């Protein structure tokens, strides 16, 4: 990538590209990870990916390394060991930056463990970029390339690729490789694999035209979307509710451009709709809207992105489900809109066509929306859930519904939270996954044949660190 090309992409995509030396020091912590993506160095922090200027990053790391070496001479005991480890981290980053720019570095420098849940299956990526899935597999959504048998423990996805992002759809799965390529597998009757066909696949298929440059991916019930490094979005699959965002209702088995959308920071997909968070924190959504889940003060289905009322800035993340959507603000306030029910955190029987605050929870850092239930990570790392309690989906050791938040049993230091149709999972301490709720297809991943898990159960056989 030329210096001019890098500058053009960076200007189009980023705010605050240049980091201070203080940020350079914190970038070695576990919450900040550098990736090599399509010959571009990317920093992934709290689900947001930002391109890094390689020259400035190199300068910062060299300065940090020099400072650490000076401190090493004066340090003793545990402090000395910690500083030595940090020096090794800077050395690794400095070694891999030129490899990344040359295109000969694979996998990513360091992958943040992450998860995604489909309706009845779950998938996770560990720090080494390995991807495993478990649960429902009738359509090959686990991607093991061998069979369509359900699994109640993690099963490796076929092939040798390393991955940085994953998205579970209703009966299919999509992922982004460390090279920035989009792949999908599972059911394909609506073209949701994006490979130009409607044939199901038990192993990963390349999404047409997306062999590089993909930074994030999402999957709905029958459609998929990818965020590109330029800040634009492409979608494919079913389009009966306008969820592809290209201004039509025609399905497409290959990616099409979402119209009128640029500067996208992150993506989220509901069952039959899609939402995007833009730079600056504005939110736009498109697709099915019968319950007001697009938040544009109407029930009109939209085939192109529409503004979410009142959310023109300050949004850090969005989660979408069947009929309701929620967004986390920089203040820690949680805003939700869409279908009425206990999952909205109150007893109202009227759908919310525009966002309103959930007043029973505060200090929210992440949110996950499932089918008639909502879960959130709050300050300190605890998980709170509310809404429909069937199958134990609230994780509090019971199967009762609750309009007010209840705590998921035994969870602290939560870092990543995801929800499926009737189950939820969380990564704790960056190293281990726990799931709860329906286990009818083994989607909890704890090796049990029990139909439900009312409390969080540890996923077995796949440490994430």
Image (cartoon, rainbow, N blue to C red):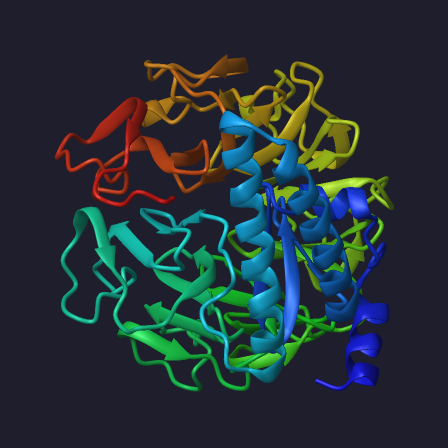
163, above or below 256, in the image: above
Q: Is residue 297 visible?
A: no
Q: Position of residue 80 (x, y in %)?
A: 54, 33
38, above or below 320, in the image: below
Residue drawn at 56 percent across, 69 percent down: 96
Q: Position of residue 57 (x, y in %)?
A: 74, 61
Q: Is residue 286 left or right of residue 319?
A: right
379, above or below 277, in the image: above
Q: Quadrant of the N terminus?
A: bottom right
Residue drawn at 74 percent across, 44 percent down: 295
Observer-nearest of 207 and 358: 207
Q: Is residue 297 left or right of residue 292?
A: right
Instruction: Give the tally of numbered discs.
Output: 0
Instruction: Point out the residue furthest to the front here.
Output: 73
Q: Is residue 61 left or right of residue 193?
A: right
Observer-nearest of 106 and 400: 106
Q: Is residue 10 visible?
A: yes
Q: Quadrant of residue 433?
A: top left
Observer-nearest of 465 and 185: 465
Residue drawn at 46 percent across, 57 percent down: 167
Observer-nearest of 146 and 160: 160
Residue drawn at 42 percent across, 74 percent down: 193
Q: Quadrant of residue 187?
A: bottom left
Q: Position of residue 385 (x, y in %)?
A: 50, 22
Q: Position of residue 388 (x, y in %)?
A: 44, 24
Q: Quadrant of the C terminus?
A: top left
């Amino acid at each position: 990538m030329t210096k001019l090309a890098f500058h053009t992409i960076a200007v189009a995509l980023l705010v605050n590209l240049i980091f201070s030396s203080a940020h350079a020091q914190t970038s070695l912590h576990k919450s900040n990870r550098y990736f090599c993506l399509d010959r571009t160095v990317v920093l992934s922090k709290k689900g947001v990916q930002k391109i890094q200027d390689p020259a400035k990053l190199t300068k910062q790391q060299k300065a940090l390394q020099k400072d650490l070496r000076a401190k090493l001479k004066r340090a003793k005991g545990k402090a000395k060991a910690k500083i030595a480890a940090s020096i090794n981290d800077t050395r690794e980053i400095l070694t891999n930056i030129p490899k990344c720019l040359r295109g000969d570095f694979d996998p990513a420098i360091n992958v943040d463990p992450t998860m995604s849940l489909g309706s009845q299956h779950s998938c996770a990526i560990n720090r080494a970029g390995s991807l495993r899935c478990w649960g429902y597999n009738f359509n090959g959504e686990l991607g093991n390339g061998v069979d369509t048998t359900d699994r109640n423990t993690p099963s490796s996805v076929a092939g040798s690729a390393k991955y940085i992002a994953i998205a579970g759809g209703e009966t299919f799965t999509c992922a982004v490789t460390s090279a920035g390529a989009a792949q999908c597998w599972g059911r394909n009757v609506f073209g949701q694999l994006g490979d130009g066909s409607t044939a199901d696949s038990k192993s990963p298929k390349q999404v047409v035209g997306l062999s590089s440059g993909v930074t994030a991916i999402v999957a709905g019930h029958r459609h998929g979307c990818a965020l590109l490094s330029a800040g634009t979005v492409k979608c494919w699959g079913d389009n009966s509710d306008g969820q592809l965002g290209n201004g039509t209702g025609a399905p497409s088995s290959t990616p099409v451009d979402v119209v009128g959308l640029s500067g996208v920071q992150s993506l989220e997909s509901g069952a039959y709709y899609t939402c995007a968070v833009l730079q600056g924190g504005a939110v736009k959504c498109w697709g099915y809207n019968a319950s007001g889940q697009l938040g544009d003060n109407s029930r009109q289905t939209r085939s192109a992105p529409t503004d979410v009322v009142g959310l023109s800035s300050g949004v850090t993340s969005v989660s979408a489900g069947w009929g309701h959507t929620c967004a986390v603000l920089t203040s820690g306030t949680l805003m939700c809109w869409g279908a009425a029910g206990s999952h909205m955190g109150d007893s109202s029987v009227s759908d919310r066509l525009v966002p309103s605050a959930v007043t029973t929870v505060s200090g929210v850092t992440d949110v996950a929306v499932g089918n008639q239930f909502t879960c959130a990570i709050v300050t300190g790392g605890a998980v709170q859930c509310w809404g429909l309690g069937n199958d134990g989906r609230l994780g509090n050791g019971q199967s009762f519904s609750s309009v007010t938040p209840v705590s998921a049993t035994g969870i602290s230091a939560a870092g990543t939270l995801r929800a499926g149709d009737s189950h939820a999972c969380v990564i704790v301490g960056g190293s281990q996954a726990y799931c709860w709720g329906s286990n009818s297809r083994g989607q909890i991943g704890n090796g049990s044949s029990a139909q439900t898990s009312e409390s969080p159960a540890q996923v077995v056989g796949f440490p994430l660190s």
